[in-house]
Amino acid sequence: MSLTETVSEIDHLSEEQRDCIENCNAAAQVCEWCADECLGSEDMEECARLCRDVADITSLHARFMARDSDYSSQLAETCADACEDCADECESHDAGHCQTCADVLRDCAETCRNMS
């Protein structure tokens, strides 16, 4: 069963929450990839750090939404802020992985902002 199929089985979620969970999971994955690609380059240290933070925050936010946590909306705002900051950093680099990451993070920030 795919992640989308699994998320669709959680009956308390709205369509907007499902989209946000999927975007958060995509952001976590792309940030892990981007951070890994940035390792070893002194110019990319801040990008790698932000990506690692966002990977943790987005995966946590997805889990909070899935279990209908009372803290989900508060975390959504932090998640959106972190995604936007990281996207800004990624966009400042020419690397393809950074540009891809920034695109995914913009989508995630938007859906998380809607959840806050």
Image (cartoon, grey):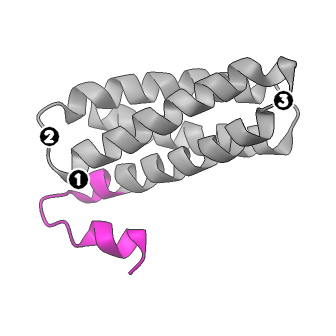
Which residues are the magenta region? 1-18
Residue 78 placed where, x, y %? 37, 23
**Residue 38 falls within the magenta-colored stretch:** no
Q: Nearer the viewer, residue 53 or 109?
A: 53
Q: Earlier in the sequence, mark 2 or mark 3?
A: 3
Residue at the disc numbered 2: 69
Distance between mark 1 and mark 3 Cα atoms:
35 Å
Residue at the disc numbered 3: 40
Q: Quadrant of the N terminus?
A: bottom left
Q: Amino acid at mark 3?
A: Gly
Q: Is residue 114 left or right of residue 86?
A: left
Distance between mark 2 and mark 3 Cα atoms:
38 Å
Q: Is residue 46 left or right of residue 93?
A: left
The kind of secondary structure element at disc 2 is loop
The kind of secondary structure element at disc 3 is loop
Q: Earlier in the sequence, mark 1 or mark 3?
A: 3
Task: Please tell me how many numbered marks the rendered image carries.
Answer: 3
User: Counting other residues with Cα less than 10 Å from the Cα at mark 3, is it few (<14), some (14-19), or many (20 or more)?
Assistant: few
Give the residue drawn at x 48%, y 41%.
108
Q: Amino acid at mark 1?
A: Ala
Q: Up-down: is 35 above or below 53?
A: below
Residue at the disc numbered 1: 66
Q: Nearer the viewer, residue 36 or 89?
A: 36
Residue 104 placed where, x, y %? 60, 45
Q: Is residue 30 left or right of residue 41?
A: left
Give the residue drawn at x 22%, y 73%.
9
Q: Nearer the viewer, residue 99 or 110?
A: 99
Front of the two marks 1 and 3: 3
Residue 98 placed where, x, y %? 76, 37
Q: Residue furthest bottom?
A: 1
Q: Is there a contact, CB below 8 Å, between mark 1 and mark 2?
A: no
